Amino acid sequence: MPCRLVLVSLLAATLPLISQTLPTGPHTEIEAFNLRLEQATRNMDNAAMLALWADQGISLLPSTKPIVGKAEIAAFLDNATAQIKGATMEKFEMTCHDIDISADTATEWCTEHQVVLMPGGKPPFDGRGKMLLVLKRGADAKWHLFREMWNQAESN
């Protein structure tokens, strides 16, 4: 039997066993969502960030009126990044806790720390925050950010 055929047969026989040992389910899906959120934030990628939001999402930020729907969220993100054009994310860390799932809705709270290097010799932004996230499973079977509430956290 040629070596290639043996390898293909071996892979075909073990793939069902491997897939059974991989973690799956809503908690794993939400953890994967959180990784995508971290990556979009770390890369300051507005398109990737917007893709995580539900169409009817609402962001509740301090001292800001509610930002309602993807169009307003996109405008907010574009405006925020335009104000710091040339800035780069040096560090972004996010830790989420207490995922609670009920049908197609999930909640969790997260802490975040970010350091953004500002252009033009301005001092870096070094901020910490706390977030409450509400996720909804969409018609595409993926979790989307439905509500976000953020406030500043104390420095360590």
Image (cartoon, rainbow, N blue to C red):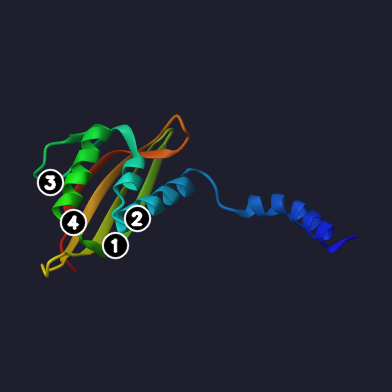
Q: Earlier in the sequence, mark 4 or mark 2?
A: 2
Of the two numbered discs 1 and 4 on the same chain, state the one appearing first in sequence: 4
Q: Label 3, on which residue?
A: 62
Tell me which label, 3 or 2, sits earlier in the chain: 2
Q: Amino acid at mark 4?
A: Lys
Mark whose residue sits in front, 1 or 4: 4
Q: CA distance from mark 4 to mark 2?
A: 20 Å
Q: In this figure, which residue is indicated by the disc labeled 1?
A: 92
Q: Secondary structure at mark 1?
A: strand
The answer to whether the residues at label 3 and label 2 have Cβ atoms under 8 Å apart is no
For residue 40, above or below residue 2: above
Specify the quadrant of the image occupied by residue 111. Answer: bottom left
The amino acid marked with disc number 2 is Glu
Say which quadrant the N terminus sits in.
Answer: bottom right
Q: What number is the disc on residue 85?
A: 4
| Labels 1 and 2 touching (C-beta < 8 A) | yes
Name the residue at 20% across, 48% down: 150
Mark 1 vs mark 2, CA separation in Å: 7 Å
Label of residue 38 in the image: 2
User: Is tag 1's residue or tag 2's residue first in the polypeptide sequence?
Assistant: 2
